[in-house]
Amino acid sequence: MTNNELIEFYENIDKVTSFKRIRTVYDLTNDLDVFLLRFLRRDFFKYYLLKIKEEALRLSDAENKDIEHVFEILFSDDVYMYYMEDTIDVFCEHISASFIDDFIIKTNVFFPELDELERIGFSKLKNSEENNSKEPVALYDELLDDYSVPLIRRIVYLEKLGIIEFLRKARPFNTSVNSIANVLGSIVDAKPSSIQPLLNPLLSKDLDNKNNPLNSAKNVMAVDTHLMKIGYSINK
């Protein structure tokens, strides 16, 4: 498939049949190679985000540096392309809803199919290793778990466990949000530039800010449920 044909596929993803989409994915990924599946999703995601960015820079009232910062975060961590609701909720402040309507329609059509095809690809990888009489490779588990917990939820975990509160009382974290973001980045394996926009409203207790992780009811409920299930007493 040529580059022009691939772009045409992306542009018309919601206008072709499910069979056509799935058949094309099989062809593009050499029968569901797990690495190619990941890169296909990333390529599609970034293709549309760049289009949205161009529109935002051209038409949005927000300052260009704010828009650039939003998209720097979006491009820095692949987890955002697996949790579209959180992505839209957190980063829509500088993006008009009209810019992303078409993107949402296309991802709602395409990404559930990719999810299923990735599960099939993972199963094929695992079965292949088991049939060769080897221990299931760590690669399979790594790929399966890589995006199992979105960054927002990881920050909620740290908040609920009191780790963020503990850090903010110690030097140099009590005077520098950037320092907290840097050390948390090492803990949760994320870029500080992705973490700091979530920390700012969390630390300032700005519950009206869309970036505050505690405003994501879905993630807060998931964390609370998990912690209670394992016997942790939640005080917040």
Image (spheres, rainbow, N blue to C red):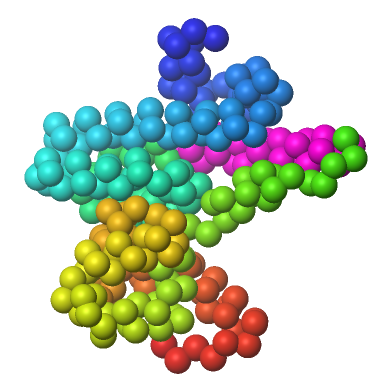
Q: Mainly helix, strand or loop, the magenta region?
A: helix
Residue at the spot x=21%, y=32% of the render?
55
* Residue 121 on image: x %, y %: 71, 35
Q: Is residue 227 above or below residue 18?
A: below
Res 209 visible: no
Quadrant of residue 164 in the image? bottom left
Q: Along the line of sight, which residue is nearer the eye, 111 or 189?
A: 189
Please identify the quarter of the rendering in which residue 112 is found. Answer: top right
Residue 60 seen by the camera: yes
Q: Quadrant of the C terminus?
A: bottom left
Q: Nearer the viewer, residue 124 or 221?
A: 124
Q: Is residue 111 magenta?
A: yes
Vertical placement of 31 versus 128: above or below?
A: above
In percent of width and height, residue 214 lies at: 37, 73
Quarter of the picture containing the N terminus is top right
- Where residue 94 sits in the image (x, y, percent)? 20, 48
Q: Read off the magenta span.
A: 105-131
Decide if residue 157 is on the left or right side of residue 165: right
- Asked where in the image residue 29 lies, by quadrant, the reply is top right
Asked if the stretch drawn in magenta spans residue 55, the answer is no
Which residue: 82% across, 35% down?
A: 128
165 displayed left or right of 224: left
Percent across and percent down for residue 183 are: 34, 66
Q: Nearer the viewer, residue 167 or 30?
A: 167
The residue positioned 28% from the left and 73% from the top of the image is 202
